Image (tube, grey):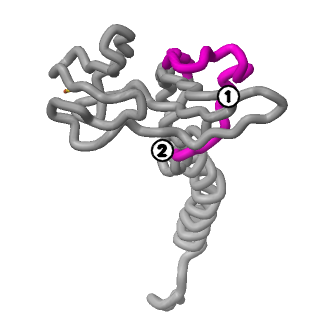
Amino acid sequence: MASSNRVSRRDFVKVTTAVLSTIMGAVVGLPVIGYLIDPALKAQKSDTWIPLGPLENYPIGKPTLFTFTRSKVNGWEKTVNSYGVFVLQKSKNEVTVLSNVCTHLSCRVNWHEDVQEYICPCHDAQFDADGKVLGGPPPRPLDKYEIKVEDGDLFIHFVEG
Ligand code: FES
């Protein structure tokens, strides 16, 4: 005579199988889910020193464009961005490095030797050799990089994020 409160062997096997399946699913599934979403959760900000080559290669008194590319991984997406900076060696070992990105809407400025100004082709902004706004819509000067010189080579501190 079976009591209604007793668990049948069949129900016991069903419950035990369900519990073990859930535990095994969690043991196998959670690391996989973590692996798949981890890149999307990681912060992508980075900073590094970018070498611009020997300082002596940059003429005194003339802004010189230097370009480089950086790869960036954002989640599962990899992008390659190109950057440009103007190196101005005002006198021996007095160096300014400016971004060539206009502070208005991010067009690329060019150095115009004839007027001694950086000019933005998009809305005709003008900046002086130190990056100061001389005219046009930009709200602030061109971005200036922190620099260092090691063994005659010039580096800029580059923050990406
Ligand atoms: S983007 Fe340079 S002036 Fe507008």
For this orientation, the residue located farthest to the right is: 151
Ligand 1 found in image quarter: top left
Secondary structure under tag 2 reads helix
Q: Can see residue 143?
A: yes
Q: Can see residue 36?
A: no
Q: In the image, is the residue at mark 1 within 8 Å of ligand 1 by its beta carbon?
A: no
Q: Which residue is mark 2?
A: 40
Which residues are the magenta region?
45-69
Q: Position of residue 110 (x, y in %)?
A: 36, 15
Q: Amino acid at mark 1?
A: Lys
The Cα atoms of the two marked residues, 1 and 2, are separated by 46 Å
Residue under the point 34% across and 29% down = 128
Sort mark 1 into few (<14), some (14-19) or many (20+) by Cα contacts within 10 Å: few
Disc on res. 92: 1
Magenta span: predominant SS is strand
Compared across the picture, whether 118 is left or right of 54 comes to left
Examine the rendered structure and indicate whether residue 128 appears above or below residue 46. above
Q: Is residue 47 magenta?
A: yes
- In front: 9, or 143? 143
Residue 140 picture quarter: top left
Examine the rendered structure and indicate whether residue 11 appears above or below residue 146. below
Nearest-to-viewer mark from 1 and 2: 1
